[in-house]
Amino acid sequence: MRSFAKEQCWKLNRLLPARFSRGYRLQYIAALLILGGTIAASIAGYMSYQSVRRLIVKNLEQNALLEVRNRSNKIDRWIETRKAEIETLANTPPVRSMNWLVAQPYLKSEVNRLPEFEHFALIESDGSYFTTKVGRAAANVSDRRHFQKAMAGEVYVSDPTISRTLKQQIIPISAPVRPKVGDPTSGTIQKPIGVMNGVIKIQRLAQVVGKLEYGAGTYAFVLNSQGVPIVHPDARLIGNTDLPASSLLDSKDANLVSIVREMVYQKTGISLTKINDAKVYVVYLPLEQAEWSIALVIPQENLEKELYPLNILAAVTTALLVIAIMAAVVALKLFAKDRLHTRTEALLHRLTSRTRASLDVDRILQTTVEELGSILDIDRTIFGWYDPRKDRLEFCSEYYREGLSSRLGVFGAESGPSGDLAARLQRGESVTLRKVTDIDTLVSQESQHLRLKNRQYAAVPVLTQTNRLGYLFACSQWQFGTPDEVELLEAIADSLAIAISQSQRQEQIQEQLKLLEEVLAKLRRTEAHLVQREKITILGKLTAGIAREINNPINFIYGHLLHINDYLQDLFIIIQLYSEKYPESVREIEEEKEKIDLDFVSQDLPQIINTLKIGSGRIRDTILALQKFSTPDDSDKTYVNLQEGIDDILVLFASRLDHKISLVKQYNNIPLVLCYGGQINQVFASIISNAIDAMNTSDNQEQIIIVKTEVVEYPEGRFIAVSIANNGPSIPPEIQRRIFDPFFTTKSVTEFTGLGLSLGNKIIAEVHGGRLWMESPFEFPFESQNAGGVDFVVELPIL
């Protein structure tokens, strides 16, 4: 009731249009007087209700304890009767004779007469015994507590145990059997000569205890001296001397442990507690005839049902008082809300008008915080942009009451985990912001603090369409942040977000137009590249066809040149033989020999034939290399000799490798590689072509291209590494970062001749599971005038 009154007073104070120092209007003063009197009456009535309730509950507890005590006495009397019956049997002559043949008929008749007992047993002083169930038993009970107590002269009710003959859970009641009076062997002190034992089933005790009740839902349980249940509705908790269970003193329920401790100490009482998530009264008291304590668990409503009329009366009274208080609060709230709503609508209208008139974000923000501060009549209103990466706020517009100082700038949280500022503002926690200096540290001066105290500020996010997050803050030295005030801030934040988005959209349109122009230019370049690439593709197909057409005639010419050379050699031999055999030839023949210069022809013609053979051989090798290079790959990977593929490519580039460029091959013994040979050769051709282009732009007098193959090992496996290095100019870092980007090239469209490094990287990495990387500048293994150099390395896994 007190917390309710305090809350309503706080709400009422927040609804007033003026502070305490500014005076109230007449209707507010009247409403406060009525509300204050209602609250005072409510407090007095609540205290009176509590006093009366305590008195009634105390009386009900005493009545319940007395009633349970009277009923538990019946259980004590029942146990006392059973003890008396066993003690009486122990003093009868048949039993005192300790002769089972004499005692057996008598005890069997007594079993029928006393139905509470399951059977009787006559135990001799050494622990052996006879029962009315089985006669002589094979077991011995000298270690049983009830036997030891009876032999000590005490009539004793034992804790439940397991019968060693019947294997059932029983309660033994034992009494000492003393010798007959006048027996000369008995002496002056009649020590027991045996034990008379009566057995009661545990179910019978449970039936007797179950009659103890106090309305619906009640239940009783019995504990032994160690706090172990021997009778309980939950059979899992019950224990006996042979199968011990956990004591309730070890329970995890602290309320239950407290009750059990009182029962173990043999105390009497009644307690209101909570057991198994239900409020109950527990009445507990010890039994006099056994080392047990009994408890009755009564549901709270059973005992307190006489309080229902009082509770109903209190509830009705409370409801009427609450209705009266809420009616006054609602009336004031509606008046203040209507006034606040009118001023909010006016502010939103002005904000919309200024947004249409001007798209200046700074002007819109400043106007909004000033008018918002004026409407709410608070200390400070601020707008700031939130940077989630640095977890900071940049305050760019603010309004503050006279006497305060500006807090524009960048602020960070004084404490708390990094990245948690937005979450703390969302929860309305107290936050101390410190200004950040140019060197990215928090300033410690008090004048640079901005303390946002819990319940004295509200922070509403302003999410623009550009996903830039702003915050609108309202801070007060009074309590602040009612739903109406937050609703006002959210309405202003929504309108402000629209205004900011419209302004930013204009900037975005300009940026997008500029970006569109760049994209169009890039598309034109890309289109030119694609056209050029299509030409190269068509040229490759034409080249493959031309290579096949040229290959057959060249093979024909090359093969016949060999025969022509042989035939000419044979003819020259015959001519030589004629010259030797017929030195004096006909004059016409001599003139013709001088005319054709037969000696020169015989020397020059073999050289011409050999030159034709070399030339046609080079043409044939070039055509074969071109045919291999332009032939498409099969659908499946095959094992390829990479070094042969590189040699074929070098044959194709022989015309571009002029006398200024030296080619160095450093081949090592490498295995065949399972791959698409055509694709791999295209990658090598692209890298070698780029290397030759780099050489053509180099000023080195000695230009060198090194092709090296070797096997390298990494933790993930063995690879074949093909290195293609040149001592041309190094590649600048800004180009290295983009060298594998799609459509990126440093060449003009006319110079763009084929496969790029982006596609080459995909072929090596994605298709073949290898790596393509570069190093520039590169430490060249030979002396070079250029300090740069580039080395491209292709690594393919050995499968």
Image (spheres, rainbow, N blue to C red):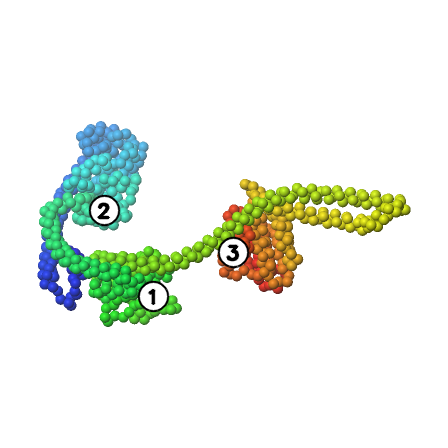
Give the amino acid at mark 2.
Asp
Residue 643 screen position, x and y as percent: 62, 49
Q: Is residue 451 left or right of residue 70?
A: right
Identify the residue at image location x=54%, y=54%: 750
Identify the residue at image location x=19%, y=47%: 279
Q: Nearer the viewer, residue 160 or 350?
A: 350
Q: Quadrant of residue 503?
A: bottom left
Q: Residue 277 — which label?
A: 2
Q: CA distance from mark 3 to mark 2?
A: 75 Å
**Residue tagged 1:** 410
Identify the residue at image location x=26%, y=39%: 235
Residue 39 screen position, x and y as percent: 12, 57
Task: Give the mark, 3 or 2, whose residue is nearer the N terminus.
Answer: 2
Identify the residue at image location x=26%, y=58%: 495
Give the amino acid at mark 3.
Thr
Q: CA distance from mark 1 to mark 3?
A: 43 Å
Assign a secondary structure to mark 3.
Answer: loop
Q: Nearer the viewer, residue 514 or 363?
A: 514
Assign a secondary structure to mark 1.
Answer: strand
Circle 2 packing at 10 Å, graded few (<14), some (14-19), many (20+), is few
Q: Quadrant of residue 577?
A: top right
